[in-house]
Amino acid sequence: MKHFADRVAVITGAASGFGREFARTGAQLGMKLVLADVDAPALASLQAELEARGVDVLALACDVSQSGDVQALADAAMGRHGAVHLLFNNAGVGCGGLIWEHSEADWEWLLGVNLWGVIHGVRIFTPLMLAGAAADPNYEGHIVNTASIAGLLNASNMGAYNVTKHAVVSLSETLYHDLRLIDAAVGASVLCPHYVPTGIHKSERNRPDDLRNRADPTASQVAARLLADKSVRSGKLTAAQVSQAAFDAVRDGRFYIHTHPEMLDAVQDHMSDILHQHNPRDPLAAEPRAMALLQARLKARKA
């Protein structure tokens, strides 16, 4: 996808973090925006900001874990513009802890947003984009799914999150192959960031009441929150820089979007362990302070 001006971008999780910066970058490039988020006040604030700059914005409250909400988003986008050219399946949440200590509600929440949100987006929007390509010989389309470096590695104490992000990488790679199989005028990319200052470490603020944990958090879950808060806040790369990298990848037709190339050594180690049948190394072993924090919290629990 080489051209962005006057094209239509649909962005989920648009009210904060990467989504908000995708919207701002798209606006700078002259795109028409369809923005979705569960945080209605933050979404309205972004809409006002962009409309004050003369940007064509349609904003809708949307829970991507619900297929009906994503269908309504697609219907609204098509009703307003008649086409969708760029789709960011970006909404995401996070929580951590020892994998057996994740509650059923944890699994339902993370799988619902991080995985089912992408599934719904791909299932509902891809046919619309393919139809747009069939109707317009000049059509260009692209789908970007937000995964994580956690979709390429398996660090301890964040099992549910790892599972959802690995699934998004798998879904995205298959989407890429399937689109090429039919010579579609629609491309695909997967975004695999490491820690960036966004609001994901505060995901609980938007957690549905019926999926909240009633029990107090375990020591491993408290440690995961502390580590996530510290790591996200200390990230040097900004969400705006990640957004620019994503748009550059779309323009260049690149599938893998790596924001922290220094993490690729750990990915290579992971693949080497698989190929040589070695026991898997924990990626956190390369971050001794993080490992020490987790181990100290767990030891304190036993004391």
Image (spheres, rainbow, N blue to C red):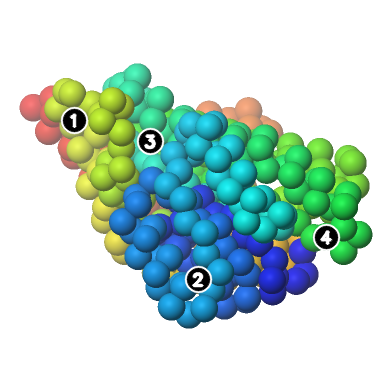
Rendered location of residue 173, percent (x, y): 71, 41
Q: Is there a contact, CB below 8 Å, between mark 3 and mark 2?
A: no
- The 10 Å Cα crowd at callout 3, few under 14, some 14 to 19, many 20 or more, is many
Of callouts 4 and 1, the N-terminal one: 4
Q: What residue does disc 3 label?
A: 158
Image-based side of 32 in relation to 303, left or right: right
Crowd around label 1: few <14 · some 14–19 · many ≥20 (10 Å)? some
Helix, strand or loop at mark 1:
loop
x, y percentage for residue 70? 55, 39
Label 4 – label 3 distance at C-alpha: 40 Å
Farthest residue, direction bottom = 53
Give how far across and how far down residue 6 sits, in percent: 69, 71
Front disc: 2 or 4: 4
For disc 2, the marked residue is 24
Which of marks 4 and 2 precedes in the sequence? 2
- Left or right of 66? Residue 81 is right
* Residue at 87 percent of width and 58 percent of height: 136
Q: Tag 3 or tag 4, which sits nearer the N-term?
A: 4
Q: In terms of sequence position, does the residue under pointer 3 or pointer 1 come before the other?
A: 3
Residue to which mark 1 is pinned: 217
Say which of 115 and 124 sits in front: 124
**Left or right: 47 in relation to 102:** right
Q: Residue at x 26, y 30 (%)?
A: 209
Query: Residue 139: which disc?
Result: 4
For residue 55, side relative to residue 223 (left or right):
right
User: Which amino acid, by three-letter code, is at mark 4?
Assistant: Tyr
Q: Nearer the viewer, mark 3 or mark 1?
A: 1
Q: State whether residue 152 appears in this view.
A: no
Proximity of marks 2 and 4: CB atoms separated by less than 8 Å: no
